Image: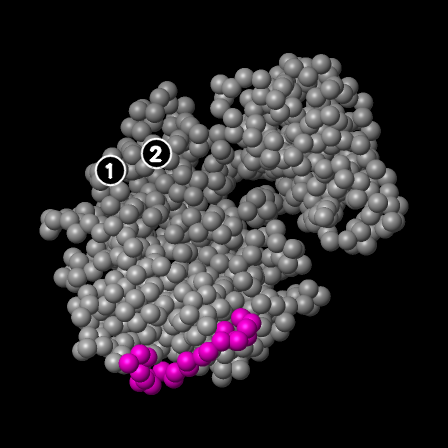
Amino acid sequence: MRWQIEQRNGLYLSELDWHLDARHPVKRSFVSHAHFDHTGKHQTILCSPPTAQLIQQRLSGERKWIIKEFGETFELEPGVEACLYPAGHIAGSAMLWLKKAGQSFLYTGDFKLTPGISAEPCQPVAADTLVMETTYGLPRYTFPPENEVYADIIRFCRDTLENGDTPVLFGYSLGKSQSILRSLTDQGLEVMLHPTALKLTQSCQKLGWKFPQFLSFDPRNQEGKVVISPPLAKTAEWMKSIRNPKTAMISGWAIDPSASYRYQCDRTFPLSDHADYLDLQNFVAKVQPKEVYTVHGFAKEFAATLREQGYQAWALGRENQLGLAIETQTPELHSTNSEDTDQIPADPSASQLAADSFQRLALTGETLSQSDSLQKKSDLLEAQLASLDAENVSHCLKLLHNPSPADLEELPPKLVKQSLILATGSSESKFKSLYHDFRDNRKVARVLFSQNPSNPSRTLSQICSFLKTLTSAPNPIFKQSLLSEQFRKLSPSEGCFFFDFLCGTSQSGLSADLLCQAIATRFDRQLPSVQSAFLRSGSLTTVSTAAATDTLPEIRIKPFHPIRPMAAKTEDSAEAIIEKQGLSVWAEFEHDGIRCQIHKDGDHIDLYDTEGQRITHLFPEFVDDARKIPQHFICDAVVVPWGYEKPLPRGDLEKRLNRKAEELFLGEEIPVVLWLFDLLSLSGDDLLDLPLEKRRQRLDTLSVTPKIRITPVHPLVGVEQIEHTLEKAATSGSKGLVFKDSESPYNPLSKSPSWLRLPARARD
């Protein structure tokens, strides 16, 4: 016989009339484990005892239960022998084995072959037909040893706590949260759990699982604690109760280079409750099936892999191309060995190299990328700069800080990649083949640069001089020729470091604060004066040179050099605002628009977004209106869609920005107003150090126009006035209120926020 398997509402065995992991209510379904995406309010559920207990706590309602212990043989239907085996995914997760008319069948559900620390060990069993999940069915999803990942997580927690921040570990509430918690056993770390993770951890305790001591999350007692939470956005209300959070996502998808960006986390760690690529293959080898059906994730790709190994394999519900038996050659530079992809070939140690050696900086950069401790990073940076003269300190800082967006526009990633291919004698097809496995240009670069000789000879001065030549080259072809020639001269470590720098993908984790601290230490200057100079110039090389010559106070804000904007800290009540700023406060309506700076010097006007990108072309109407204002100025502002003397929905502004450039009359269709709310420079005078009250007095002297206006200030006293004004803000279409300390300078680098915000409450 052949097992008839349909992919609908989970999987359906038509000859038995049983569903497998149905998501919507059915008459009867096998439920492999208690995650919500594998179960539903079915009339009859077949599962293991732990899964039954977990489901009963998560789903309401009466139903019939068929609860079987692992390894207990029973008759599912007349003539159909059945048995459940541990799947190793989460507590209670089970695989379903069936046998009818001499033919056996195994359905894995979600499984993990490598023993985890919060699930029963997976127990593969022989079967003629195997239906398996293949979430991570590509070679690049080969995970590092779990003990190493857990060690990295613990190191991240310790470093974060040492920095005075709160480590927040994201993992799904059932399964991953318990694994993370158990990994912290005997580490001396105090752990708090998000309410959902707390409830399910307590449920697992009732099943007999042992965990280290943990606490319910308490915002009043969170200092020095590690927090475990289900994945949440940083803007989520619950996250706002955590002081100085530093977040880490624990997921198998962390293998992908875009994971930190996708999850909007500070760190990601590759750890999964699912089988990785090697485990998938090992599992099939243990089951020895005659035919395999793959589901979920990279099902089609893994089925093709199994066919290459001689199995009859198909992806359920997918078009399967069996193809021709054409042998494919692996590129000669290709290797999936982690020693070839994640580590740079051995080079001389940093201590053996000259102080101004580019190789020494590259090795320091690699060490910096391996630590989350701010103190360790600071010590490494201080040691790197200590023996350098002033000129080379400037060169070093330039190479440690990611290039500006304008610099990267001159050197697009495609040009850098093509230069690498040319320099290493590779080809576009080889690069694509490597990228297919790693999905990470940085790892591909490490493989390609491994062919370079380890004979470093470049100095920091030579590299910075080359950068000037490269950016001033007349055309892309010439730039590619120059860069490929330079890549040929670099050792593997130097090449990887320089490639990361040019692509803006440095992993050193050096913040502007750390780099400013390093400058202050190296030249024995006061940190606030270094930070003030960097705020105004945005250039570490400029600041370093000024620190060396004791001319930091001479650095002033300049037109068309946008600076970092102030940010407001969100509070949750009027009482919290008064507690921090006093009974009498200054408030402004918070417009729902695009934050920007406007710079005017004569007839030259430019607008910049918060990343320093020029956006003047998006709002040409402001240029003409700004010319009507006689003064020269730099202002903090926001672009707001505006009609009939009230704000329009933010979506209208998005519609305007998404229109094609050639469409006319956009300003007439979706009008905008530029609301000014702070003055940073007036007629060449730098105003950043002045109190807000004096800056506002000068801002009020500017001439307003129909399209450029000044945001009013509302002096308020007490909770009642704040609540009343907040209601007016909501009624008028504003996002809420921003409260500003009238005595504060404009200092975005300050650790003590002088701007606070209170969001408007959603209206029924």
The local crowd at label 2, few if under 14, some if 14 to 19, many if 20 or more residues have their Cα within 10 Å, is: few
Provide the residue span drawn in magenta. 54-78
* Residue 126 in sight here: no
Quarter of the figure with the N terminus: bottom left
- Whether 169 is drawn above or below 75: the answer is above
The disc labelled 2 sits on which kind of residue? Lys
> Looking at the image, which residue is at 61% across and 51% down?
235
> Looking at the image, which residue is at 55% across and 47% down?
511
**Residue 640, image x and y in percent?**
67, 30
**Residue 111, image x and y in percent?**
35, 69
Q: In which quarter of the image is residue 138?
A: bottom left
- Whether 570 is drawn above or below 668: the answer is below
- Whether 670 is drawn above or below 584: the answer is above
Element on which disc 1 rests: helix
- Judge whether residue 72 is colored magenta: yes
> Looking at the image, which residue is at 31% across and 79% down?
77
| Residue 226 or residue 478, whichever sits in front | 226
Element on which disc 2 rests: helix
| Residue 485 or residue 567, whichever sits in front | 567
**As drawn, is 680 to the left or to the right of 612?**
right
Q: How far apart are marks 2 and 1 (CA)?
A: 11 Å
> Looking at the image, which residue is at 69% across and 44% down?
568
- Whether 321 is drawn above or below 537: the answer is below
The local crowd at label 1, few if under 14, some if 14 to 19, many if 20 or more residues have their Cα within 10 Å, is: few
- Judge whether residue 457 is colored magenta: no
Q: Which residue is disc 1 drawn over?
A: 428
**Residue 375, image x and y in percent?**
55, 57
Q: What scheme was used to colour the molecule?
A: one colour
| Residue 684 or residue 463, whichever sits in front | 684
Q: Which residue is disc 2 drawn over?
A: 414
